Amino acid sequence: MSIGNSGRIVIEIPSEKKRLLYGELSKRGISLKGWFLDRVDGYLRGNGESTLLDHKQLADIFTNKFDSATIADGASEKPTAGKQQREIKAPKQALCKAYEELESRFSVRILQSDVSYVSPVNFVESLRRPRHRWFPYKEGFSPTFVQGFITEFTKAGSGIVLDPFSGVGTTGLVASKLGFNAVGFDVSPMAIFISKVKSIVLTSTEIQKLSIYIRDVQNSPLEERWTPPANSTVVSYFEEEYLSALLSIRMVVSSAPNKKISDLALLAFLTLIEEFSTHRKAGNGVKRKTRYDYRKTNESAKEKVRIAFVNKLSEIREDLELDPLAKIPNFQVASCINSNAIADIDEVALALTSPPYANCFDYSKIYMRELWLGGFFKSTSDQSAFRKSSIRSHVHATWSDRNTEYGSEIAERIICPSLESQELWSNKIPSMISGYFKDIGALLSTLKPKLRKGASFGIVVGNSVYGGISVATDLLIADMAEQMGYSVTRIDVYRGVIPSSQQYALVEDRRWARESTVIVKKK
């Protein structure tokens, strides 16, 4: 076998198999490259235990003859017997019936059912908006969506707008612009830092100081370096000369003339990390880039990083001049699940949030480079504490069984037992699903007494799939909220979503694969 240095792989298969393969992947909205790379990732993670399917298995899948339980959640799962598939068919039917009953009980507004990677609730628009564009955070909201929601469900500028999973502060910034007192909480120290920095206001004198600092960076020899993070994995995500250049800029950040400028500079630094890394964010972590765009120009690594840093700071300075804030949101590092974080908050006029989806994504992995290089994590114990403080939406921590008085009856009665009977890529997934809805229940209970009578609470969620079992988070949250005394205004469906290619082949009823906003109201 000749390997060579390129990333190209060429194989020849029978023409009929090629036609069948392309046709069926197209129906599922899956590219051949994406399907193949998913299989390769699963093979490599399995330490040589291949999960790549042979031609007969492919043909059987495409003609619905192959036991659908053999492709379970995650590429590293092993086939299960046909008997097991028959055993879980009845729970699937019961779950479908339960979902249909809930959907008939609530007002479900389908704004878009097609599969899309762009929707009103995602962050794409923010990349073009002043302040919001300072840090690319794909889990964030669209400012227009937030503004529309606030406008529809509140009186102008009256009271507190709360976001209990505030991320990088989109809800708070938009609410402040509309004249509300905005409050946001998040367990991520980096997200709260970014939120606070995006809310900075500078006087004309301070803007002049920022301009001088930018000029000084342009002329700096960049000889000193910040200490590398004590995490070999993070270090491995960079070529040596580019990590050295980044650490030189990190040292320049520490020499800023005051805290405001230092914070703005650190935010600008955080935006450079992925650009000059050998890896990109992908799913629940990072993947090696197929091309390194930062190599395209002839400048030294140090000059490339300096130019990018100066350009970002210049963009920030421009936004500070053109987009002043009249009110400053209040952002805090804390969990709202059932803590004392909101003890002093009353008369909330509106709450709008997007909790982490129950999709096993671990944000301490996805943003590992930024968390360590930004100084938010200094040890593995910091990462462990972050994971344990988060909602139970992933399997990378061991939690005590908290909030046992809450939860979803449907999840406990049908979903979790069905998942426990399958060979999933992690045996923690059923307990994660159970814990997720218990934590969401605790949140609904904690916030209810803080809301004004008639106040609306919007919860943006994405449904998930494990082992061919759909977890309709939107319907289950609406059901829980109604049982806790909220009225359910409606569920707005913004887009269909595709789970992993393995899951897509397994799901028989794809109505529940979607991203939605659940809107409830305090009676």
Image: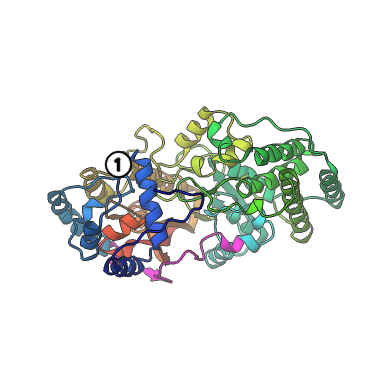
Determine the secondary structure under disc 1: loop
Q: In this view, does 378 lie to the left or right of 444?
A: right
Is residue 485 visible to us here?
no
Q: In this view, does 124 lie above or below 291?
A: below
Image-quadrant location for residue 515: bottom left
Q: Which residue is drawn at 46% across and 40% down?
A: 390
Badge 1 crowding class, 10 Å Cα cut-off, few under 14, some 14 to 19, many 20 or more, is few
Number of dots carrying numbers: 1
Is residue 30 visible to us here?
yes
Foreground pick, 440 / 377: 377
Q: Please say whether residue 93 is one of the residues in the magenta stretch.
A: no
Q: Name the residue under label 1.
A: 49
Image-quadrant location for residue 464: bottom left
Image location of residue 422, percent across then percent down: 22, 45
Foreground pick, 86 / 410: 86
Image location of residue 452, percent across then percent down: 51, 54
Give the magenta part as a residue range.
101-126
Q: In this view, does 418 lie above or below 63?
A: above
Q: Is residue 392 left or right of residue 191?
A: left
Q: Please say whether residue 102 is one of the residues in the magenta stretch.
A: yes
Q: Which residue lies furthest to the front in this view?
A: 2
Foreground pick, 189 / 331: 189
Q: Residue at x 46, y 57 (%)?
A: 460
Image location of residue 29, percent across then percent down: 38, 66
Q: Is residue 327 left or right of residue 444?
A: right
Image-quadrant location for residue 66: bottom left
In the rendered structure, which amino acid carries the disc numbered 1?
Answer: Glu
Foreground pick, 350 / 104: 104
**How is the model colour-coded?**
rainbow
Q: In this view, does 66 lie to the left or right of 257?
A: left
